[in-house]
Image (spheres, rainbow, N blue to C red):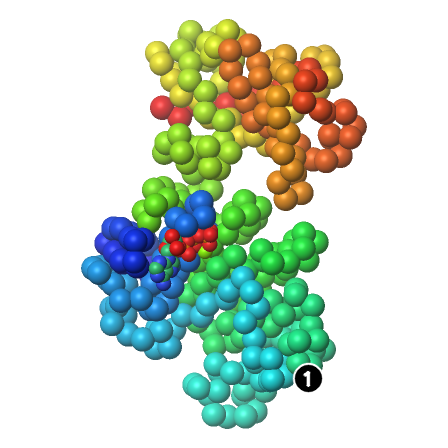
Amino acid sequence: MPLLEVEDLSIDLGDFHLRGINLEVERNDYLTVIGPTGAGKSVLLEAIAGFYPLRSGRVILDGRDVTNLPPEKRGISIVYQDFVLFPHLSVFENIAFGLRKVERNEERIKSEVEHIAEELRIDHLLHRKPGTLSGGEQQRVAIARALVVRPKVLLMDEPFSALDEKTREKLRSLVKKVIGEHGTTVIHVTHDFEDVFTLAKHVAVMRNGRLVQFGTPEEVFSRPNDEFIADFVGTNLLRGKAEGRRDGLTAIRVGNVVLYTVDEAEGEVTLSLRPEEVILAREPGECSAQNVLPVEVTGMERRGHLVWLSLAADGLSLRAVVTPNAVELLKIRPGKRFYALFKASALRVVK
Ligand SMILES: Nc1ncnc2c1ncn2[C@@H]1O[C@H](COP(=O)(O)OP(=O)(O)OP(=O)(O)O)[C@@H](O)[C@H]1O
Ligand SMILES: [Mg+2]
């Protein structure tokens, strides 16, 4: 039995409608929710937490229908993007806040707060006021406060997005460790695919108030349901025609070039290629990649700590992701020509 079931959930919020959401989250699952701004990700989280009246549908938590329970009775904790802490309370009292509602024993409160603070490495800050802490420290306090009550489900709405890159990376791995040790079930809304790749067991994609794809990161990123999702997650979708097997690989004509995939295919096919799988080289040289294409750089965009490239080959275009180091090393600029290399195993047949 799943820990959390969302059945046919619909909500009306002014002009916005969340429609027919069906979702199952297993115990110990880590679900990330992605989608463009305004898709309804935050509304979905808050609906699960119990902040909105439903138009229709049910929320079942741990075998119990909680649809009509107020938020505080659901056993759910929520962590927001901006560190919402009580400024006049110490870090200790901030973490103890929710726990005091269910636990009266002062000794036990003290030991639970100290324990979670130690795990999140904020035990040296317990006497301080939130205003004197860095963003990363404040967010660790918010996560400690959410975890200390041992929620059935932890909801996080872009918990790392207000942090700088280094702090975000550190906190991401710390959260992964602590949540793994606690066996907490998590639903985490994010715009950062790094969160998906490092934390998620499952991904839900939302668009216009609907859930448009659910699966493992591998499924969603390699086999997006449609063009919109492919575009959103940055996966290259290429359309071509299978031309038979050669040396254990399938040859596929795409535009004016022939590409090779390890998958079997016949007739018209759609192929996917993750941008991380594309390597740029000055010379084609000798290498193990089965696909080597001359390309021209047509666009560059810095996103997070990576650089996304648009590449034009003969009759097809590709997206690739490289590091700023690679950009410097190869002097990658729009208008320059390179070779794009990728393995036959990186090119997947979608349908
Ligand atoms: N209380 C409300 N009343 C009316 N409309 C609302 C309310 N809350 C949210 N909305 C609208 O619902 C839509 C979905 O909002 P939501 O905050 O869930 O988007 P999101 O997917 O979380 O976007 P972002 O990535 O920007 O955080 C938006 O168009 C928003 O304006
Ligand atoms: Mg949001």
Q: Is residue 20 above or below residue 87?
A: above
Q: Quadrant of residue 83?
A: bottom right
For label 1, the residue is 127
Q: From this viewpoint, which residue is outermost toward the left? A: 56
Viewed as shown, does residue 349 lie left or right of 6? right
The image quadrant of residue 240 is top left
Q: Residue at x 54, y 83 (%)?
A: 96
Decide: few, some or many residues near mark 1? Use Cα within 10 Å; few <14, some 14-19, many ≥20. few
Label 1 sits on what residue type?
Answer: His
- Ligand 1's image quarter is bottom left
Residue located 55% across and 47% down the image: 192
Report the residue at 35% width, 73% height from top: 71
Where disc 1 sits, the SS reads loop
x and y, in percent, of residue 194 in the image = 58, 46
Q: Quadrant of the C terminus?
A: top left
* Quadrant for the N terminus in the image: bottom left
